[in-house]
Amino acid sequence: MTSKTPLRIRVRRMDYDMSGLRRYWYKDNAWITHFLNALSTTFPDGERFFIHSVRHFESQIQDPLLREQIRAFIGQEANHGKEHEAFNQALIDQHGLPLENKLKFMKGALAWAKKKWSPREQLAMTAGFEHFTAILANLLLEREEVIADIAGVYSDMFLWHAVEETEHKAVAFDVYQAVDGDYWLRVRSMALATFFFLLVTLRMQHSLLKHDGKLGDWRAALGFAKFMLVKPGFLTRIIPQYLDYYRPDFHPWQHDNRHLIAGHVRTLASHELRPAEAAAATAAGAAAAA
Ligand SMILES: [Fe+2]
Ligand SMILES: [Fe+2]
């Protein structure tokens, strides 16, 4: 089987300055900010789980292009984990957000998943989660107001993550198709991934809002409902692409959105580390994920 990813995946080692983080960094809205903080809390260990599940099958892949893409996927995800780790730490240090127990929960839950699920089940879950991140990334790139509404340098960080999630969106899927390809396991895993994704992020958001005494902030709650359902429609707009995953002949690049990332690559360059620093940092990140 040959890889169907139509572009070269580039590993960029970034270094974002996490100082001066606004408490409600998305439009001063506590509900939306804490929803996105909850997402960020799931990223470092989630992305290490993705690396682990893809790396397990690397030696079974014959296609040289897909092997190259697996290395790039691992490099990109390791770097995402590192930057989101720094971002999560900034939320703890600068705003005293109680993220430690949530990060510990993620570590425990994924350690449990590694023991409980077979490698093929873990890979199928990863392919599902990767489609999820890809369609959210597509929304961020398509609706430019989402990135524009993020305060400070964090808009660049989320843009970088969205570009790279797009670049490598088919890697886990292609590995799954090459080593297994069972349709029912793929769609069952996606349904399960959706359930976990909603349960964990909404529970974390609720807990953070409770901590800040913002559960009763109805103006922010209405803003969140608008954000999810209407503009940009963080939930509603992704539904058609989400459902496409359940088609037997689905492939992530049937949603060809290369044009959305081409223009952003130059913006990313200003935060990139020099090649020698990047190589050292990437190797350290990938080793930590092993
Ligand atoms: Fe990522
Ligand atoms: Fe990813």
Image: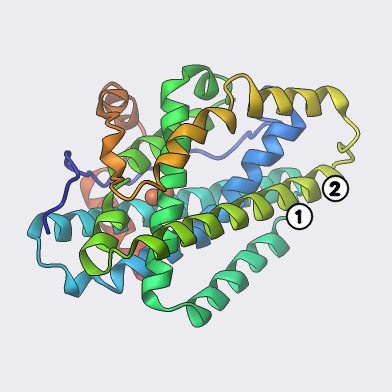
Q: Amino acid at mark 2?
A: His
Residue 98 drawn above or below residue 154: below
Task: Identify the image quadrant of residue 187.
Answer: bottom left
Q: Is mark 2 within 8 Å of ligand 1?
A: no
Q: Residues within 10 Å of mark 2 (few under 14, many from 20)?
A: few
Question: CB atoms at circles 2 and 1 under 8 Å apart?
Answer: yes
Tell me the CA gap for discs 2 and 1. 8 Å
Q: Is mark 1 within 8 Å of ligand 1?
A: no
Dot 2 falls on a residue whose secondary structure is helix
Q: Quadrant of the C terminus?
A: bottom left
Q: Nearer the viewer, residue 235 or 29?
A: 235
Q: Amino acid at mark 1?
A: Pro
Dot 1 falls on a residue whose secondary structure is loop
Q: What's the mark number on residue 98? A: 1
**Whether residue 26 is visible:** no
Question: In the shown orientation, is residue 252 left or right of residue 83?
Answer: left
Q: Quadrant of the N terminus?
A: bottom left
